[in-house]
Amino acid sequence: MRDPYEVLGVQRDASAAAIKSAYRKLAKKHHPDANKNDPKAAARFAEVNSANEILGDESKRKQFDRGEIDAEGKPRFQGFPGGGGSARGGRAGAGAGGGFEQYNFRGGAGGGAGFEDILNSMFGGAAGMRGGPRGGGAGFDFDSGGFAPDLDQSVAMTVTLEEAAKGSEKRVRLPSGKELNVKIPAGVGPGQQIRLKGQGESAPGHRPGDLLITVNYAPHPHFKVDGNDLRLELPITLYEAVLGAKVRVPTLTGAIELSIPKNTSSGRTFRLKGKGLPKSGTAGDLFVTTRIVLPDGHDADLEALMTKWRDGHPYHPRSDLG
């Protein structure tokens, strides 16, 4: 992956606010829902998210700036313990330029330190190896005792609220261009990860890594997410607020009817139990807040009615404000 500063287009001394602003702008620009005809949009969107995971986290940003982690958040190799001098034939000696220790690998019965002996001396016997018999010429394979490469791969996936609530199957494109069908479990939350065993990167002599898919919610035209609850602003007419009515309300599982009592003020909130997002066998609620909407333009009859009503029935809803 590219340098996260380059991905977000910010300077290395950029403030946290500048990084956040750049991320939001790019995430909106490259969001797959806004680029449905661009097959590369998902990869760019995932790259922007990955860059923000580094630079948007103060601790990770400092680690990256110090060179402790790479652009994917993986630890960088810091050199062998006690490195500095050089050695030839297994004996320590003063190297001309310093740096990593050097070894001549002379195995077999001819004398000198064998490859396994040198590794054992370097790592105290902790570097286990697998392969053919010692000195038999077979290639060695490091075990997972701390020296195996990190072959896991991370991508981002955007799902709709309906897909998150009901579960679904989506196709995800990897940076390599490979595509996979992924089952989205019902109730998956934003920021949660789906792990696909053995679908990550590969390297000779090692088990394939895993694919880690981070789930994000796509913006919804009606609902706002509040944990496992959903919130909805419901427009109603003036006469529905005054006289009461039954109105259709959208939910993730289909529209239902909601009874609006007489004399309902704008801003009144109704709770629809169990109509939110599912989690652990239960579900959140849907909170519906009414918003009285007047007709467009000037309506002479309505104005005349309100003038008459105002003169005959005055009231003061702001009296408690002083």
Image (cartoon, rainbow, N blue to C red):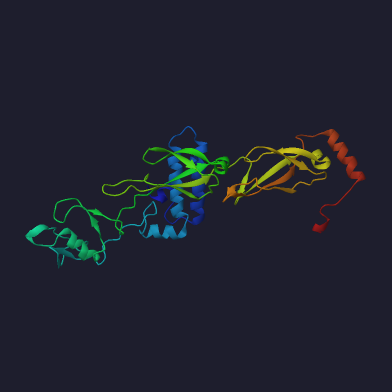
Give above or below for 94 relative to 190. below
Where is residue 275 drawn, in percent x and y? Answer: 65, 45
Q: Nearer the viewer, residue 259 or 14?
A: 259
Give above or below for 33 relative to 149. above
Where is residue 265 drawn, in percent x and y? Answer: 79, 47
Q: Could you tell whether 294 is left or right of 279 in the image? A: right
Q: Could you tell whether 39 is left or right of 217 in the image? A: left
Q: Nearer the viewer, residue 208 or 2?
A: 208
Quadrant where the C terminus is found in the figure? bottom right
Residue 67: image quadrant is bottom left
Where is residue 271 drawn, in percent x and y? Answer: 70, 48
Residue furthest top as drawn = 37
- Picture residue at 38% right of the left edge, 41% below the top: 175
Where is residue 178 drawn, in percent x and y? Answer: 38, 38
Q: Could you tell whether 166 is left or right of 322 in the image? A: left
Q: How many marks?
A: 0
Give above or below for 68 relative to 179. below
- Picture residue at 14% right of the left edge, 64% below the top: 90
- Please say whether residue 315 is visible from this viewpoint: yes
- Please say whether residue 237 is visible from this viewpoint: no
Residue furthest left as drawn = 110
Q: Nearer the viewer, residue 11 or 128?
A: 128
Residue furthest right as drawn = 312
